Amino acid sequence: MRLSRERIFHLADRILTELKAADGVTLAKSEEEVRVELMRALTDEAKLEETIDQEVRKILRSYARPPAEGSAEWEILYEKTRGEVSRRRFRF
């Protein structure tokens, strides 16, 4: 799912609000600096998710008989392939 800039800003603002309300949390930087860093992290994560999605779709299209997108078979293969791609990318 592609996140709009407004959605990313909203999520960063919600996270910042929760951090400020949490007991024992003290911001080491200004609220604006923390918000900008949260937005950067959320944007990077969204880009990563998008590249994984593109790779999975490419793999599924490469099958000799690709399943119809949205079918139960496609959903199962998508989730399985997505897990494999994620594990491969984040192997330490």
Image: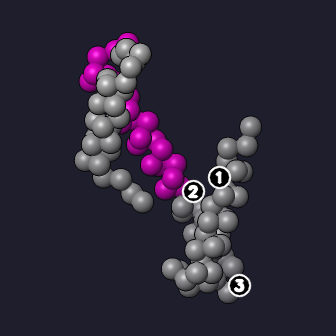
Residue at horizontal 73%, vertical 43%? 91
Q: In the picture shown, does residue 24 fall above or below 78? A: above
Image side of residue 50 versus residue 16, left or right: right
Q: Percent from the top left, x then y, of residue 61?
A: 61, 77
Q: Residue furthest front?
A: 23
Q: In the picture shown, does residue 3 fall above or below 44? A: below
Q: Nearer the viewer, residue 44 or 70?
A: 70
Q: Which residue is mark 2?
A: 52
Q: Which residue is mark 1?
A: 86
What type is the residue that disc 1 sits on?
Answer: Ser
Which of the marked residues, 2 or 1, is nearer the chain's N terminus? 2
Helix, strand or loop for the magenta stretch, by majority = helix
Q: Nearer the viewer, residue 23 or 57?
A: 23
Residue at horizontal 46%, vertical 41%? 44
User: How many residues crowd around disc 2 within 10 Å: few (fewer than 14), some, or many (20 or more)?
Assistant: some
What type is the residue that disc 2 sits on?
Answer: Ile
Which label number is shown at residue 50? none
Q: Residue 80's quadrant in the figure?
A: bottom right
**Marks 2 and 1: CB-CB under 8 Å?**
yes
Q: Secondary structure at mark 2?
A: helix
39 within the magenta span:
yes
Q: Which residues are magenta?
A: 28-52
Q: In the picture shown, does residue 46 fall above or below 54? A: above
Q: In the picture shown, does residue 1 fall above or below 14? A: below
Which of the marked residues, 2 or 3, is nearer the chain's N terminus? 2
